Amino acid sequence: MRKLNQIGDGLNAYTFTFGDDDLNEIRDSVRPYIDEILTNPDYKQVLNGGKQYSLPIGEKTADYYLVSYGTSPLLWLSTNTDHAYQIYKRFFEAVGIEADVKELVDYEKNIVVYCGFLVIGNKSPAPFVARRLFPGSPRLYTDNAAV
């Protein structure tokens, strides 16, 4: 049974369903970074767009790194260490979409998660795929794992 659902004809974008508990490890790892982005006034401007950003959050060796999507008001909270990467790799393995992904991409031996990231924004006129990462938090638009 297919787990990936194409969001529109001819689009290379898919959704899939997973249990809320599958996000727990990701939630625990990103919470300090999300809190910093949403509450520290120094980061308020990055959610406004208009400028490209590439910023460490804390130390250069921190688990996550913040990158803007050009000048759009979207931010990628991307893994910056092997420790953080392994969290997203475990998520990918837990949700069981590898067989579907194998039908969509060319590969020689295995499908490998190349990065884990969240896409964060607060300007969407209407939710597309949205999940509240934490109960009571602002709605965050997320792409939970890239393959």
Image (cartoon, rainbow, N blue to C red):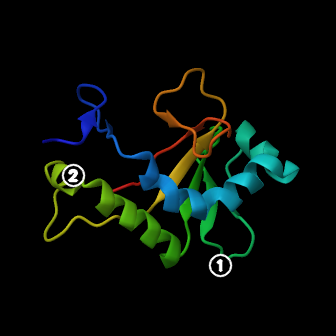
For badge 2, the amino acid type reads Val
The location of residue 143, given as percent across then percent down, is 46, 46
| Residue visible at 57% across and 39% down in the picture | 132
Judged left or right of residue 96, residue 116 is: right
| Residue visible at 72% across and 41% down in the picture | 47
In this view, the residue farthest toward the right is 41
Up the image or down, 104 lies above or below 91; here it is: above
For badge 1, the amino acid type reads Thr
Judged left or right of residue 99, residue 131 is: right
| Residue visible at 68% across and 38% down in the picture | 136
Q: Nearer the viewer, residue 8 or 85?
A: 85
The reply to whether residue 114 is visible in this rendering is no
Residue that carries the numbered disc 2 in the rendered image? 101
In the rendering, which numbered label is found on residue 61? 1
The location of residue 53, given as percent across then percent down, is 68, 53
The location of residue 91, given as percent across then percent down, is 38, 60
**Label 1 or label 2, whichever comes before in sequence order:** 1
Q: Nearer the viewer, residue 118 or 3?
A: 3
The location of residue 139, given as percent across then percent down, is 61, 35
- Label 2 neighbour load within 10 Å: few <14, some 14-19, many 20+: some
Q: Which quadrant of the view contains residue 44? A: top right
- Label 1 neighbour load within 10 Å: few <14, some 14-19, many 20+: few
Judged left or right of residue 29, residue 57 is: right
Residue at disc 1, secondary structure: loop
**Alpha carbon distance from label 1 to label 2:** 31 Å
Q: Are marks 1 and 2 in contact (CB under 8 Å)?
A: no
In the rendering, which numbered label is found on residue 24? none
Q: Nearer the viewer, residue 54 or 111?
A: 111
Residue at disc 2, secondary structure: helix
